Image (spheres, rainbow, N blue to C red):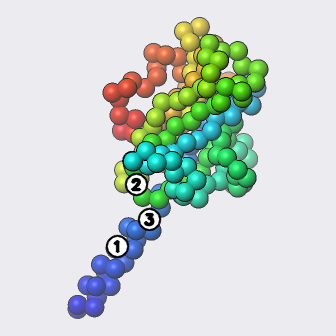
C-alpha cells in the first residue's frame, strides 16, 4: 500500500514538472504590404527575464497549408497568415510582439519608430489555446504603427480588420479571461 502511494505521488509530481502546454499565436492575413511586415515575438517570465528561446520548443506553420510545420532558423517572428506554435513550460508569461523601425518597409504609418504591442499575460495553469496578433489602425482605418495581442480573433472582411483604437484592449482589462 505504501509503495503504491509513493508511486502515485511520484507520477503526479513528474507529470506536473514536465507538463507542457501547447500555445498558438496566430497572425491572420492583412493586405499584401502589411503581410510582409514581420512582428517579432518576445516572451518574458514572471520576473521579467527574457525566456523567448528557452521556455519551450517552437515552430511555425502557414494557415493556408495545414499540417506542415517548419523550424525557425533564428528569430521567432510572424508574417501575415503565419501561426507560431510553442509547447510552453509551466509558468506565467508576458507575451508581446514588435517590429523594429527599419523593417516597416512600404507601410506609411504615424509611428516611424519601433512598432510595439500590448503585453498579453499568459498563465499555463489556466491556458487558452490560441491568441491573435493584429495591426492597429487610426480612426480612418490607416495603419498607425502598432500591434495588439488578444484572446479573441479579430473581425474579418476579405482580410483581417485591424483594431481601431476604441476596440483595443483596455489597460485594466484582463487579457486572458
Asked whether, in this view, residue 125 is left or right of residue 21, the answer is left
* Secondary-structure class at tag 3: loop
Q: Kindly indicate whether the residue at mark 2 contacts the one at mark 1 (C-beta within 8 angstroms).
A: no
Residue 112 makes an appearance in the image: yes
State the image coordinates of residue 26 (x, y, percent, origin top left): 59, 40
Q: Is residue 113 above or below residue 51?
A: above
Q: Badge 1 local density, few (<14 within 10 Å), some, or many (20+)?
A: few
Q: Which residue is mark 2?
A: 91
Give the residue at x 72% y 19%. Answer: 107
Q: CA distance from mark 1 to mark 3?
A: 10 Å
Q: Is residue 92 above or below residue 37?
A: below
Q: Is residue 119 above or below residue 67?
A: above
State the image coordinates of residue 128 (x, y, percent, origin top left): 44, 47
Asked whether, in this view, residue 55 is left or right of residue 73, the answer is left
Q: Which residue is mark 3?
A: 19
User: Foreground: 119 or 11?
Assistant: 119
Q: Earlier in the sequence, mark 1 or mark 3?
A: 1
Give the residue at x 38% y 67%. Answer: 16
Q: Earlier in the sequence, mark 1 or mark 2?
A: 1
Image-quadrant location for residue 27: top right
Q: Which residue is mark 1?
A: 13
Q: CA distance from mark 3 to mark 2?
A: 10 Å
* Secondary-structure class at tag 2: loop
Q: Kindly indicate whether the residue at mark 3 contacts the one at mark 1 (C-beta within 8 angstroms).
A: no
State the image coordinates of residue 122 (x, y, percent, origin top left): 42, 45
Q: Which of the image's four quarters has the C terminus? A: top left
Give the residue at x 54% y 21%. Answer: 163
User: Foreground: 167 or 54?
Assistant: 54
Q: Residue furthest top?
A: 140
User: Foreground: 33 or 159?
Assistant: 33
Amino acid at each position: 500500500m505504501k509503495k503504491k502511494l509513493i508511486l502515485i505521488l511520484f507520477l503526479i509530481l513528474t507529470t506536473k514538472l514536465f507538463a507542457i502546454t501547447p500555445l498558438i499565436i496566430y497572425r491572420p492575413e492583412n493586405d499584401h504590404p502589411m503581410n510582409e511586415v514581420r512582428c517579432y515575438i518576445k516572451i518574458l517570465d514572471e520576473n521579467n527575464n527574457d525566456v523567448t528561446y528557452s521556455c519551450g520548443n517552437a515552430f511555425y506553420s502557414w494557415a493556408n497549408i495545414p499540417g506542415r510545420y517548419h523550424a525557425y532558423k533564428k528569430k521567432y517572428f510572424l508574417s501575415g497568415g503565419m501561426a507560431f506554435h510553442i509547447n510552453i513550460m509551466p509558468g506565467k508569461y508576458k507575451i508581446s510582439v514588435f517590429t523594429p523601425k527599419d523593417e516597416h518597409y512600404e507601410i506609411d504609418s504615424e509611428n516611424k519608430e519601433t512598432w510595439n504591442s500590448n503585453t498579453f499575460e499568459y498563465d499555463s495553469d489556466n491556458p487558452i489555446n490560441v491568441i491573435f496578433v493584429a495591426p492597429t489602425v487610426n480612426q480612418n482605418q490607416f495603419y498607425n504603427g502598432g500591434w495588439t495581442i488578444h484572446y479573441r480573433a479579430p473581425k474579418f472582411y476579405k482580410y483581417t480588420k485591424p483594431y481601431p483604437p476604441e476596440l483595443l484592449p483596455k489597460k485594466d482589462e484582463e487579457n486572458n479571461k
